Image: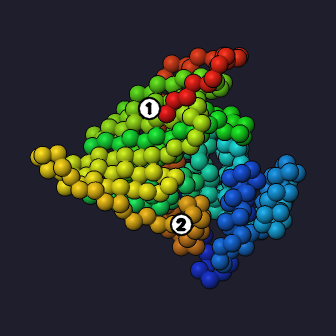
Amino acid sequence: MSSRGTGSDMKIAPKRSLRVGVIGAGVMGTNHARVLAGLPDTSLVGVVDPLPAHRSRAADLTNCRTFTGLDELIAEGVDAVSIAAPTHLHHELALACIEKKIHVLVEKPIASTVEEGREIVAAAQASDVTLMIGHVERFNPAVAAIKHAIAGEDILSIGITRVGPFPPRMSNVGVVIDLAVHDIDLIRWFTESDIVEVQPQLSSAVAEREDIALLQFRTANGVLAHINTNWLTPFKARNVTVATRGKYVMGDLLTRQVTECFGFKPDGSYSMRHLPVGHDEPLRAELIAFLHAVRTGGVPAVTGDEGVASLEIATRCLESSPKPAAAPTSRKGPRRVVG
């Protein structure tokens, strides 16, 4: 089911410059504004954020106008917006834009709850508005190389590690929604199958919400997958491995190195090669894909339904695991590090 209606009245004339805006000027929203300001045939109308410091940063970086509220941006006239505000605001903001027939890219996760996500999808379909979800990792050139390498293969298992230090920004979610939802989406995308079994193990070591998550899955087509994620590792690591009947693919999403092992022999020998990987900035590729869907009326690269499906699995992980123990008020000695 597409996250866009079948009508053509919302199609944008290909040669007309698109008027776009950004809602939220935190780290991610400011990056959205930076990229949009540099895209051809695109006019960045402005950035919305209630915080003066955020507006000042966005204005300095992009030389664009800033607004304290959404109504001010809408009054200037926009064809499309990127919503990079805190997750609990996604539902309200997306519905307000859709009501005005404004095409919407919503940063992951689509909403705070599955129900809110479904309401956004339904509203976009009813209004024939393009809705795309910002699962930017799909646009990482290393991820694209892995996807290409396993195309047509009989996938057996997928392992993903996404770890790092506690984020400096304040967050009202734990690692499952903040980090693992990226990889839940990748598992569904790699396998082209729904996740049907979830076995989560969560812990709160130093944070109020879960900061360690070991998640195991089985897809409808029989692939076993696991995600290891935490906020306790002092450095960032983003690694993917995919085992198929014919090859073993390893990818580092930070260094963008992808290696393929193949030609397995009975004596245990095999061949290895590095795969070509592009150099595109993932966020730029994502925003270009979104605006292309707006212009053409085509199905967006990450539909609203896909965003809801990934959020639903993440929610199941949180609901089906015993509640993590509360974080201790103090810790003596060096912090324990896990990888």
Q: Is residue 48 above or below residue 9?
A: above
Q: Are marks 2 and 1 in contact (CB under 8 Å)?
A: no
Residue occupying the far bottom of the picture: 15
Task: Categorize mark 1 by other alpha carbons within 10 Å: few (<14), some (14-19), many (20+).
Answer: many
Q: CA distance from mark 2 to mark 1?
A: 30 Å
Quadrant of the snapshot with the N terminus: bottom left
Residue occupying the far left of the picture: 266
Q: Position of residue 27 (x, y in %)?
A: 71, 51
Q: Position of residue 262 (x, y in %)?
A: 23, 55
Residue type (three-letter) at the residue carrying disc 2? Asp
- In the image, 77 versus 218, the foreground residue is 218
Residue holding disc 1: 215
Q: Residue at x 32, y 38 (%)?
A: 224
- In the image, 278 versus 190, the foreground residue is 278
Q: At numbered mark 1, what does the secondary structure look like: helix, strand or loop?
A: strand
Horizontally, residue 166 falls left or right of residue 262, namely: right
| Picture quadrant of residue 211 | top right
Q: At numbered mark 2, what does the secondary structure look like: helix, strand or loop?
A: loop
Horizontally, residue 327 falls left or right of residue 307, namely: right
Residue type (three-letter) at the residue carrying disc 1? Leu
Horizontally, residue 110 falls left or right of residue 149, namely: right
Task: Categorize mark 2 by other alpha carbons within 10 Å: few (<14), some (14-19), many (20+).
Answer: few
Q: Is residue 183 above or below residue 218?
A: below
Residue occupying the far front of the picture: 333
Judged by depth in the image, the label closer to the viewer, 2 or 1, is 2
Q: Position of residue 103 (x, y in %)?
A: 64, 62
Residue holding disc 2: 280
